[in-house]
Each structure stands twice: as structure tokens, then as C-alpha cells.
Image (tube, rainbow, N blue to C red):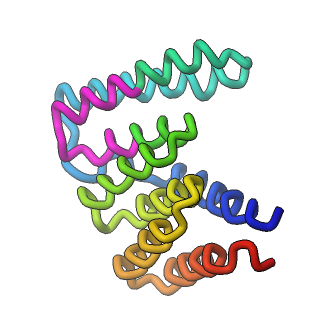
Amino acid sequence: MHTLRIPIVLAAAFLIAACFAVAGSGAPQSGKDADHNRKGLEYYSEAFHRQLPEGKQREADEYFDLAVGEFRAAIAANPRSAAAYRNLARVYYVREDFLQAADAYRTVTVLDPGDIDAYLLLALSYTRADRFAEALEALETARTMTGDPDVIAKLDGYIGKINNRGRD
């Protein structure tokens, strides 16, 4: 019961981070990568905001597959597109393929090392996959990428929750 709090707390952080994530970080988008990324977001939105709420899992899965294809095409057109990797990670996360999500978020951290949200989402993905050591590593790395004491305090709080899991 208490170990369930970590994913819930980090899930809330995921939602907050997703709201504030900057779509244009990393290499600027233009041309084909931007078109593929935009189309992938349309497919993702259809799946997540329309099909899933209506209980249409099969249809949602089809749209998620199309979104993955578009985000991969955006990455092929521009391998430095942090936005395309971030969006790909979101699809994997929603589909509960947490290790694939972590791989994509890890790439975002390489392309845009100052993106603290990407480290948080990486940690959340690893936490959901029960890979706590990797989650801690992502959060510790995020601490080194910011000088903001409020952000560091929040990161320390997440680190503490992971370190104390199961002790409550």
C-alpha cells in the first residue's frame, strides 16, 4: 500500500511536467520533422483524449501506433529533435511501456541536458518499471543541472520518497 505512493507522487509530477514541457527544446524543428511531430501529436490526442475516454482501447491502440510511427519519422528526419523523443516517450508511458519511455526520456536529457522535467519524467518511468536505482540516478543528475533551491528541494523530496519506499 505505501509503496504505491511513490508512483502516485511521481505521476502527479509527471502531469505537472508534461504541462510545462517546452515542445521546441533541442534542435529546432522545421520541415519534415515538424510535420511528422505535429501529425504524431494529432494521433496521440485522438487516442488519449477521445478514444480512451470512450472505452475504445483497440482504436486508441491503432492511433497510438500511428503516433509512434510519426514520432519515429520525425526522429529520422531530425535525430536531434528533443520534442519528437519527448512525445514518443509520452506514448510509451501511457501504454505502460516504461522502459521504452525511459529510453526516449534519456535521449531528451542528452539532447537538452538542462531540461529538468525530462530527468523527472525519466525517473518516473524508471520508478514505474521498479528500477529504483536508475530513478535515483536520474534525480541526482537533475540536481546537478539546476541551481534553483526550490527545484533542488523538490528533487530531494522525490529522492527521499524513493529511498524510503516500503518503510512507511
Q: Nearer the viewer, residue 141 or 16?
A: 141
Q: Residue at x 25, y 26 (%)?
A: 73
Q: Residue at x 39, y 84 (%)?
A: 147
Q: Main secondary structure of the magenta part?
A: helix
Q: Residue at x 49, y 54 (%)?
A: 20
Would you place residue 145 above or below residue 70 in this image? below
Asked whether 127 falls inside the magenta stretch, the response is no
Q: Quadrant of the N terminus?
A: bottom right
Residue 65, by quadrant, is top left
Percent x, y for residue 83?
33, 44
Q: Nearer the viewer, residue 157 or 17?
A: 157
Percent x, y for residue 103?
36, 50
Would you place residue 32 above or below residue 101 in this image? above
Percent x, y for residue 164?
68, 79
Q: Nearer the viewer, residue 149 or 168?
A: 168
Asked whether 74 falls inside the magenta stretch, the response is yes
Q: Quadrant of the C terminus?
A: bottom right
Residue 9, by quadrant, is bottom right
Residue 120 vs residue 2: left or right? left
Numbered-mark total:
0
Would you place residue 29 above or below residue 73 in this image? below
Residue 92 vs residue 94: left or right? left
Residue 150 vs residue 119: left or right? right
Residue 74 vs residue 67: left or right? left
Stretch of the chain drawn in magenta: 68-87
Percent x, y for residue 127?
57, 60
Q: Residue at x 42, y 69 (%)?
A: 138
